[in-house]
Image (tube, rainbow, N blue to C red):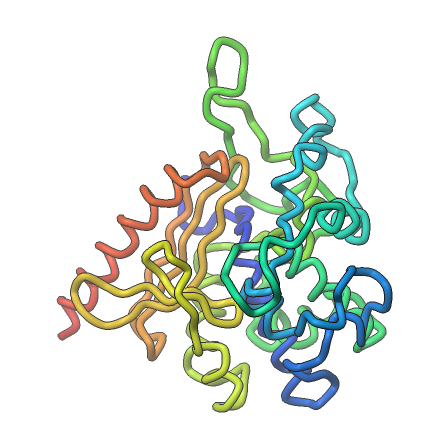
Amino acid sequence: MRPGLRYKIGSVTKTFTATVVLQLVAERQLSLGDSVERWLPRLVPGGEHITVRQLLQHTSGLFDYLEDPRVAEPYLQGDLDFVWRPRQLVAIATEHPPLFAPGTGWSYSKTGYVLLGLIIRAATGSSVQQQLQARVLGPLHLRHTSFPITDTRIAGAHAHGYLPGAGPGGTPLDFTGLSPSWAWATGNMVSSVEDVARFYRALLQGRLLPPRLLRAMQTTVDTGQGSRYGLGLIALPLPCGGTAWGGEGGLPGYENWALASSDGEDQVVMMVNAGDGGNDYTQLVGERVVRALCAIRSESS
């Protein structure tokens, strides 16, 4: 394991996706108040009542498609190359009733970010991958960051990711080659520690969004899990005082956290090449990142 290795960043992808959406809002190509129905007619039952803001903030009430066992089944059966299309994932999610009326609760939903990817495509006429490259990856020179759609390979030197206890005799199972298609705009990106840090620093220092939309991104709701959530951005209270901003990504084979001070100057990015997408690894890595960020702030004060 080395700091320069590329790795799958999972749901840290959400902050990248949200940034593109908010740039489109800044350009008046879409609005936070636009409905899902406005951009994706007849795709989501009740979509006329769900807004772009609610998708970004996980307050839409939409069922998370990954909670349906059919999504993971091909991979658990050994077909790591199996490809899911975004609209198939939405179709699976919408077979389930909403968890609550839009805007009346909070529940983490990957479905919302798949819909945001489709909205980006509908609003711009080009792919999420192209929009990310033109708006974020290119301008920030994030050369180790990519948005794979179906390619299971990771280019260059990279960390293999292991699913604990899933191999023969309870050994770790190498899950590096898992298709990124099941995650798409919600969690399919590959990056490096340095690139992720550079992205969050630029975002929090106002180099990617105008002030009013960065404020909107940092307007949060309570998750009921000890954190708050903005528009694709986690806010975490620090035991040493203040708030950390960033993202967390847990998926089979990897767990990672990226947290920064409000001004983006103090940062910690940590990647572990084992994970099962569950809460144990999330808490374990998260606690260490928080402790490290507090240590950095103490040294710099």
Give the residue at x 53% y 85%. Answer: 213
Nearer to me, 122 or 194:
122
Nearer to me, 133 or 172:
172
Percent x, y of residue 138? 64, 73
Percent x, y of residue 43? 83, 60
Looking at the rendering, which quadrant does residue 126 occupy?
bottom right
In this view, 292 is above or below 167: below
Give the residue at x 54% y 43%. Answer: 158
| Residue 224 in view of the camera | yes
Percent x, y of residue 113? 64, 60
Percent x, y of residue 27? 69, 89
In this view, 261 is above or below 293: below
Nearer to me, 218 or 49:
49
Nearer to me, 118 or 100:
100
Q: Which quadrant holds the C terminus?
A: bottom left
233 with respect to 38 (left or right): left
Give the residue at x 38% y 57%. Answer: 224
128 with respect to 264 (left or right): right
Give the residue at x 82% y 68%. Answer: 40
Q: Which quadrant holds the N terminus?
A: top left
| Residue 189 in view of the camera | no
Number of disc labels? 0
